[in-house]
Image: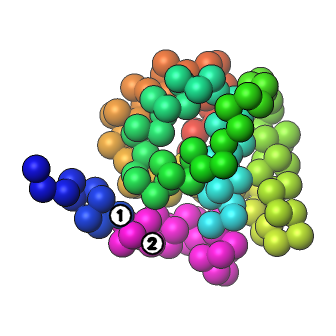
Amino acid sequence: MPMPMELQHASDDFERFLADARDFSGLATRNQTYTMVEGVLLTFRRRLEVQQALRFADVLPPLLRAIFVSRWDVAEPVRPFADRATLTREVQALRQHHNFAPDSCLSDVARALRRHVDTEAFDRVVATLPEGAADYWKV
C-alpha cells in the first residue's frame, strides 16, 4: 500500500494551516502562531477522556494530531468545560512570557482548523463529545 497522501503532504499542509491561523489571529510569526495553536489544542484535550480525545485526534490532520497527543499525561484529571474567557486565559497561560494569543484565539484556530479538516467528520465527532465541546470550536 502506498503512503497515504495526508502523510506525504503533512508538512506543507501544516504550513498552510499555520498561515491561516496566523492571518485569522493577526499574529506576526509562525512561532507565535504555533504556541497559540498548541495552547488551543491542549486546553481542549484536558476536557476529554482518553477515548474521546483519540476519536477527536483521528479527524485532525497528521501534524495537528501529533501536537494534540504529544506529552500527554493520561492520568491527569479531566477538567470541565468553562466559559470562553476562562478557556482563553488557559490557552494564553502556555509559555505565558512567549504567548501572544489574542482573546479571539479559540475562534481564530477553529476557523483555520475548519479549512483543513473534513468538516462533516469533524462535526460528527465533536457532537459525540461532552457538553461544551461544540461551543469550543464555534467560529
2 sits left or right of 44 in the view: left
27 sits left or right of 55 in the view: right
40 sits left or right of 51 in the view: right
Expressed as whole percent of the image width and height from the top left, the position of residue 66 reads 51, 52
Q: Quadrant of the C terminus?
A: top right
Circle 1 packing at 10 Å, graded few (<14), some (14-19), many (20+), is some
Up the image or down, 74 lies above or below 95; here it is: above
Upstream in the sequence, badge 2 or badge 1?
1
Q: Going 58% across and 39% down the picture, which residue do you hit?
A: 138
Location of mark 1 (residue):
10
The Cα atoms of the two marked residues, 2 and 1, are separated by: 9 Å
- SS assignment at label 1: helix
Q: What amino acid does circle 2 point to? A: Glu
Please name which of the two marks, 2 or 1, marks the residue nearer to the observer: 1
Location of mark 2 (residue):
15
Residue 80 visible in rendering: yes
Label pair 2/1, CB-CB below 8 angstroms: no
Q: Going 43% across and 65% down the picture, which residue do you hit?
A: 14
- Magenta segment includes 113: no
Up the image or down, 27 lies above or below 45; here it is: below
Expressed as whole percent of the image width and height from the top left, the position of residue 102 reads 76, 62
Q: Which image quarter: residue 50? A: top right
Residue at the far left: name it: 1
Q: Going 50% across and 72% down the picture, which residue do you hit?
A: 19
- SS assignment at label 2: helix
Expressed as whole percent of the image width and height from the top left, the position of residue 85 reads 83, 42
Q: What amino acid does circle 1 point to? A: Ala
3 sits left or right of 21 in the view: left
Please give the range of residues in magenta: 11-33
| Front in this rendered view, residue 93 or 139 | 93
Q: Going 85% across and 49% down the picture, which residue do you hit?
A: 89
